[in-house]
């Protein structure tokens, strides 16, 4: 479904991605593990069209997307739950959801239907629909960020550090939602600092270090890999 081929990305003179290649098959949960500054968020920005790769190619459903604008990439079926959630704090929950369906904003019926679906899935958001998003708890804001991404009916959902800053119980809830999404037929690319939890639910994973993929394998194989255990799972 998604193929990233030898992608290089820069921030001016900083060479953040140095020839990254990976793929995500339909229906998989693929996780990307790496330390701070490894290039995970840069890869997300590059896939979503916020950052143009200087070299390499990205294909989604066999179409090159590294040449397309962000809106077109969303339209093809990729949605991102960004790092730090990036909700619109001074707008009501309901309006935040509507933002996720900006491509369909003229189709009121579609937007209403999708909002209703999100309220069914996340009852807390219905309860808080008129509340300003900035007044929600961290966990509720993460649910909102996920719901907003789902508003465009994506085939591939990219989650950038969804468990960051959340209490353990809420983290568990987020991981359950990710598994439910997969069970419903969505494909997931999961970027996580919480490597153990992410690899446990992942079909496959990649380890990124200073802009390069240094290891790849099934979630289980990576969990058992001594390097991964030493560097990311806190085992000696
Ligand atoms: P984190 O988990 O801390 O977000 P990451 O793996 O997502 O880490 P990136 O944010 O992709 O890492 O950063 C990769 C490299 O690019 C780092 O060296 C970082 O300092 C640099 N970088 C990231 N964003 C920018 C930017 N806007 N301008 C310049 N350099 C940047």
Image (tube, rainbow, N blue to C red):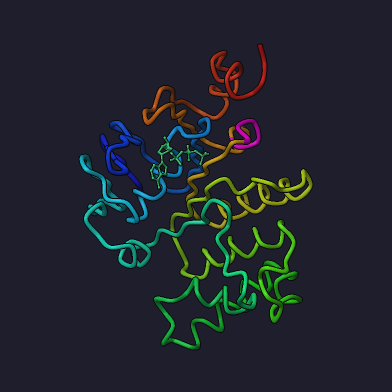
What secondary structure is the stretch in magenta mostly built from?
helix
Residue 77 drawn above or below residue 98 = above
Q: What residue is drawn where x is 64% and y is 30%?
A: 196
* Residue at x 21%, y 55% (from the top left corner): 67
* Quarter in which the C terminus is drawn: top right
- 10 left or right of 197 in image: left
- Using the image, determine if residue 122 lies above or below residue 103: above
Residue situated in front as seen by the camera: 63 or 170: 170
Task: Locate ligand 1 by image quadrant.
Answer: top left
Q: Is residue 195 magenta?
A: yes
Q: Quarter-wise, where is residue 131 in the image? A: bottom right
- Residue 101 horizontal/vertical position (percent): 47, 75
What's the residue at 52%, 48% (across, down)?
A: 160
Q: Is residue 112 left or right of residue 206?
A: right
Q: Is residue 30 above or below residue 117?
A: above
In this rendering, position of residue 40 left or right of residue 16: right
Q: Specify whether residue 9 is painted magenta.
A: no
- How many labels sit on residues? 0
Residue range corresponding to the magenta coloring: 194-198
Which of these two is toward me, 9 or 104? 9
Residue that sits furthest to the front in the current view: 13
Q: Residue at x 48, y 43 (%)?
A: 28
Seen from the viewer's position, the closer of residues 205 and 231 is: 231
Residue 180: x and y, percent? 63, 53
Q: Position of residue 39 (x, y in %)?
A: 42, 37
Rendered location of residue 107, percent (x, y): 43, 86
């Amino acid at each position: 479904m998604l193929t990233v081929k030898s992608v290089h990305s820069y921030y001016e003179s900083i060479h953040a991605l140095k020839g990254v290649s990976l793929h995500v098959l339909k229906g998989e949960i693929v996780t990307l593990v790496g330390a701070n500054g490894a290039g995970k968020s840069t890869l997300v920005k590059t896939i979503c069209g916020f950052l143009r790769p200087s070299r390499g190619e990205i294909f989604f459903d066999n179409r090159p997307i590294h040449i397309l604008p962000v809106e077109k990439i969303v339209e093809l079926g990729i949605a991102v739950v960004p790092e730090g959630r990036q909700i619109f704090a001074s707008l009501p929950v309901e309006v935040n959801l509507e933002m996720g369906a900006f491509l369909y904003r003229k189709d009121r019926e579609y937007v209403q239907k999708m909002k209703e679906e999100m309220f069914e899935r996340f009852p807390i958001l219905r309860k808080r629909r008129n509340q300003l998003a900035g007044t929600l708890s961290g966990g509720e804001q993460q649910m909102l960020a996920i719901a907003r991404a789902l508003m465009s009916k994506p085939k591939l959902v990219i989650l950038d550090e969804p468990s960051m800053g959340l209490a353990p119980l809420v983290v568990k809830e987020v991981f359950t939602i990710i598994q439910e999404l997969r069970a419903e037929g969505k494909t997931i690319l999961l970027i996580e600092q919480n490597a153990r939890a992410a690899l446990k639910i992942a079909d496959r994973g990649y380890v990124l270090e200073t802009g390069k993929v240094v290891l790849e394998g099934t979630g289980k194989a990576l969990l058992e890999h001594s390097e991964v255990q030493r560097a990311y799972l806190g085992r000696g």
